[in-house]
Amino acid sequence: MAVVERVGGEGLSIENLHFSYGGTLTIFNDLGLDVKPGEFLSIIGPSGCGKTTLLNLLSGFYQPEKGSVHLRGQPIVPEDPHLGYVFQQATLFPWLSAIENVEFGLRMIGVPQQERTERARKYFKLVGLEGFEDYLVTRLSGGMQQRVSLARSLSMEPTLLLMDEPFGALDAITRETMNDELLRIWDELGQTVIFITHDIDEAVYLSDRIAVFGRPPNGIYKVIDNELPRPRSGPTTRTEELFWEYKKQLISDIAKVTAQSPMDDTEIAELNMTMQVE
């Protein structure tokens, strides 16, 4: 199993990032952030604050007007092999089996068939889906489909895993199960993870650090170091006093950035529509 070292080396560096939609709607103005190798960073903030836009910049889908994004000391480019992206929806091919969906990305980059099959089955097992390889994804539950999507990204063995509210559409019980599964996988593989969420409990439970974003163009309002001990367990961690302290702090911080927003409801709606078009 490929493992990314959690110490040493260069992580992700965002410097002086400027980005706007159409040159008029500024999302980021001089944004800066460093993420250590193997770190689990969650980003949380009100709707329209640019969370998904940031992931699109980090993945190379969007290009900044100014500033830079480097991973392992090198500029990020579209289709960077060191990047994995898990979307809000599973985005699977319904006519393919679950294992064929996992193999798809490997096939696109020319991985030989035997290696492709071995890697796909390895990560399929890692996400807990062994025995469902030949099922059409339309026969799988929402949580199982997201596991397939995660296995597809992990099979590329990325250094940086970008996750855009991957469990947002799941019910509460399935979501907590997926949180535990993600931590188990992250602990084993050691990728750097940037995780977008609207769920405060999820951010506190998963993260090493939590970045609170304000509305555009304010960028980062605060970064919180999460000192909850690892390994974490749902029934234990979620009832710890420190967990509730972080939760109360985040509720307060998000209320403040929402109240201080320079954007009115019309501008926020315009931003969301623009992002959908993009």
Image: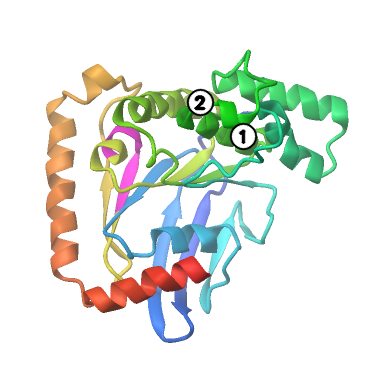
According to the picture, the residue beneath numbered tag 2 turns out to be 185
Q: Is residue 27 magenta?
A: no
| Segment tinted magenta in the rendering | 204-211
Q: Is residue 209 magenta?
A: yes
Q: Residues within 10 Å of mark 2 (few under 14, many from 20)?
A: some
Mark 1 or mark 2, which has the lower sequence index? 1
Residue 191 shows in the view: yes
Image coordinates for residue 118, horizontal then vertical, percent: 77, 22
Residue 190 shows in the view: no
* Picture residue at 33% right of the left edge, 24% below the top: 230
Q: Is residue 145 left or right of residue 18?
A: right
* Picture residue at 35% right of the left edge, 38% below the top: 208
Image coordinates for residue 94, horizontal then vertical, percent: 65, 38
Q: Give the answer, above or below, for where 43 lies relative to 275.
A: above
Image coordinates for residue 225, horizontal then vertical, percent: 28, 43
Which of the two residues, 28 or 145, is positioned nearer the viewer here? 145
Q: Is residue 125 left or right of residue 20?
A: right
- On-image quarter of the N terminus: top right
Q: Give the answer, above or below, for where 119 lies relative to 109.
A: above
Q: What secondary structure is marked by label 2?
A: helix
According to the picture, the residue beneath numbered tag 1 turns out to be 154
CB under 8 Å between callouts 1 and 2? Answer: yes
Q: CA distance from mark 1 to mark 2?
A: 10 Å
* Picture residue at 58% right of the left edge, 57% below the top: 59
* Picture residue at 63% right of the left edge, 13% below the top: 131
Residue kind at label 2, given as amino acid type = Ile
Residue kind at label 1, given as amino acid type = Leu
